[in-house]
Image (cartoon, rainbow, N blue to C red):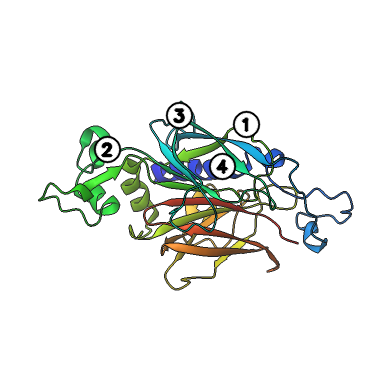
């Protein structure tokens, strides 16, 4: 249990870093001097104000790092694709074959039409799911069943090869409108850590479904407590999770000060997540994609 609490605390730190890093510099969060009301949701009553980009393209930097070490070590040997938001499955990537340099990806995105709200899809190398050198003591049938459910260990089956790190998608929300001067940290979760964390959480995860983690931001761009998330598709199939007092909880019903929550067992495809504050007032929604055995990260910000 102590191990799980430690991992869960890292999860909350990971998501805070992921969604807040550079948000005031590169994300389109309105800063309207006409706002006179107070409180974290004061902008919900204001007229929406557009903040168009003054450049045709923005340069983006994303730094991959290890979840287990709380982003103190980099992860390299990765590949990535840059995809438009509506490109389900990234079948027509805007950029493909991206490689990291010391764990950092650099690329340009278009800013026309309110900024770039697509996503970066990141993959790591492969190893056989029974490879103890790659996956340590968890290598074997348990790991294989979680990461490669169709694998047949009695055969030389290519389906038994497993990603070293869980495939990850980072949605840029709010859209990027100018250069990212400081790299956005993207913490990758080692596949070798899945069995212990999932077992400690007592959460049943479907390897054929996706997992979503969302962070709510208030009118000041800060993590928002007291937010409840609802998913408009597959409500009967998914299970919600929230970070509560530093641990991931399947019984909590709203966000704590980290603003972090999400869903597991989300069927692949495009889904919409809506947020409601503690007074049940809608604060906004975000559209993301769920992909089998993939972690999808995004943020939800106020929409007047």
Q: Residues within 10 Å of mark 4 (few under 14, many from 20)?
A: many
Helix, strand or loop for disc 4: helix
Q: Position of residue 143 (x, y in %)?
A: 26, 48
Q: Position of residue 80 (x, y in %)?
A: 44, 41
To which quarter of the image does residue 137 belong?
Answer: top left
Q: CA distance from mark 3 to mark 4?
A: 15 Å
Comes first in the chain, label 3 or label 4: 4
Q: CA distance from mark 1 to mark 2?
A: 32 Å
Q: Residues within 10 Å of mark 2 (few under 14, many from 20)?
A: many
Q: Mark 1 — residue?
A: 182
Residue 100 visible in the snapshot: yes
Helix, strand or loop for disc 2: helix
Badge nearest the viewer, 2 or 3? 3
Badge nearest the viewer, 1 or 2? 1
Q: Are marks 2 and 3 in contact (CB under 8 Å)?
A: no
* Residue 18: mark: 4
Comes first in the chain, label 1 or label 2: 2
In this view, the residue in front, 203 or 44, is: 44
Helix, strand or loop for disc 1: loop
Q: Mark 2 — residue?
A: 135
Q: Mark 3 — residue?
A: 74
Comes first in the chain, label 4 or label 2: 4
Q: CA distance from mark 2 to mark 3?
A: 18 Å
Q: Is residue 152 left or right of residue 290?
A: left
Q: Is residue 93 left or right of residue 285?
A: left
Q: Is residue 203 left or right of residue 44?
A: left
Q: Position of residue 112 (x, y in %)?
A: 68, 49
Q: Are marks 3 and 1 in contact (CB under 8 Å)?
A: no
Q: Residues within 10 Å of mark 3 (few under 14, many from 20)?
A: some
Q: CA distance from mark 4 to mark 2?
A: 25 Å
């Amino acid at each position: 249990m102590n191990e799980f609490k430690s991992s869960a605390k890292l999860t909350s730190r990971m998501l805070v870093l992921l969604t807040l890093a550079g948000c005031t510099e590169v994300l389109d969060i309105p800063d309207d001097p006409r706002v006179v009301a107070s409180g974290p949701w004061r902008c919900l009553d204001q007229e929406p104000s557009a903040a168009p980009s003054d450049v045709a393209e923005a340069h983006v930097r994303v730094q991959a790092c290890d979840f287990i070490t709380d982003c103190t070590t980099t992860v390299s040997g990765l590949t990535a694709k840059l995809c438009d938001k509506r490109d389900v499955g990234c079948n027509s990537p805007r950029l493909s074959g991206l490689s990291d340099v010391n764990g950092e990806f650099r690329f340009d995105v278009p800013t026309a039409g309110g900024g770039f709200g697509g996503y970066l899809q990141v993959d790591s190398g492969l190893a056989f799911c029974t490879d103890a050198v790659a996956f340590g003591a968890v290598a074997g049938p348990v790991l294989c069943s979680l990461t490669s459910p169709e694998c047949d260990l009695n055969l030389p089956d290519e389906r038994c090869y497993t990603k070293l790190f869980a495939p990850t998608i980072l949605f840029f929300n709010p859209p990027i409108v100018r250069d990212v001067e400081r790299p956005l940290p993207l913490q990758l979760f080692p596949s070798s850590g899945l069995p212990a964390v999932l077992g400690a959480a007592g959460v049943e995860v479907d390897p054929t479904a996706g997992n979503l983690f969302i962070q709510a931001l208030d009118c000041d761009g800060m993590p928002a407590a007291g937010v409840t998330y609802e998913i408009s598709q597959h409500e009967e199939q998914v299970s919600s999770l929230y970070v509560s007092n530093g641990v991931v909880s399947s019984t909590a019903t709203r966000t704590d000060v980290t603003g972090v929550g999400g869903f597991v067992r989300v069927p692949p495809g495009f889904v919409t997540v809506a947020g409601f504050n503690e007074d049940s007032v809608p604060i906004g929604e975000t559209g993301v994609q769920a992909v089998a055995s993939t972690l999808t990260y995004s943020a939800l910000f106020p929409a007047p």
